[in-house]
Image: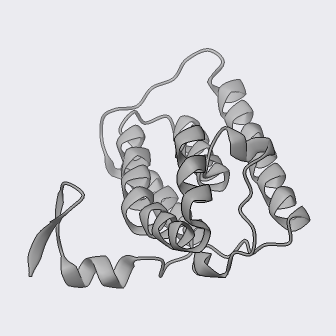
Amino acid sequence: MIESYNGTIVSKHTIKFMRLKIPPPFIMVVFGGIMYLVDRFLPFGSFSFFGQQYLYYALGGTAFVIILIALIQFKLASTTTDPITPDKASKLVTSGIYQYTRNPMYLAMLLMLLAFGLKLGNAFNTMVAAGFVFYMNHFQIKPEEEALSKLFGKAYQQYCTLARRWF
């Protein structure tokens, strides 16, 4: 019942259940909630530094711009933006922001979480953000990559060698 999944021990049932089932924006909100709880109830790890406010605004603004560009590119390509059904993609988008990262929308969500973590000012929120990356890699991105590989074959495999998963 329990097996190694890409170096991680998890149950087969968990893998099947979690793959592509929960919308990534919801996952981001859940991890944001965990960050809030960490900040609220962990009695240590707080930090503050000069320019902290400017940095979290910069990260949040960058995240907004990245997600906007990514959505516009998908719209112009007339392909789906639904992360739950990557097998319905009609076109492989590899230009613009997608030449630098295969997952700009997830990168933007990570930047939003990092900005929120900076706003809260608790160092342990970086571990929560790392948990988001772990979750997204195993239960969202890898299943998407499998679906896109089946759909676009060698073109997608070549794209994977040219653009990194996150950045």
* Residue 2 seen in render: yes
The tally of labels here is: 0
Q: Residue at x 77, y 48 (%)?
A: 64
Q: In the displayed structure, does residue 61 sit left or right of residue 163?
A: right
Horizontal side, residue 36 vs residue 52: left or right: left
Q: Is residue 80 above or below residue 99?
A: below
Residue 91: quadrant of the picture: bottom right
Q: Position of residue 99 (x, y in %)?
A: 70, 41
Q: Position of residue 90 (x, y in %)?
A: 74, 75
Name the residue furthest left: 1
Relative to 56, 120 lies left or right: left
Q: Which residue is at the front of the view, 74 or 120?
A: 74
Q: Residue at x 45, y 26 (%)?
A: 47
Q: Is residue 90 left or right of residue 127?
A: right
Between residue 90 and residue 36, name the one nearer to us: 90
Seen as rendered, the residue at the extreme front is 154
Looking at the picture, tell me which residue is in the foreground, 127 or 70: 70
Q: How is the image coloured?
A: one colour
Quarter of the picture containing the C terminus is: top right
Give the answer, above or below, for where 161 lies relative to 6: above
Q: Residue at x 31, y 45 (%)?
A: 42
| As drawn, 52 above or below 119 | above
Q: From the top left corner, tell me how far across and down residue 119 is, in percent.
A: 59, 38
Q: Nearer the viewer, residue 110 or 153?
A: 153
Whether residue 139 is situated above or below residue 102 in the rendered picture: below
Give the residue drawn at x 59%, y 39%.
Answer: 162
Quadrant of res 29: bottom right
Q: Is residue 164 visible?
A: no
> In which quadrant of the rendered image does the N terminus lie?
bottom left
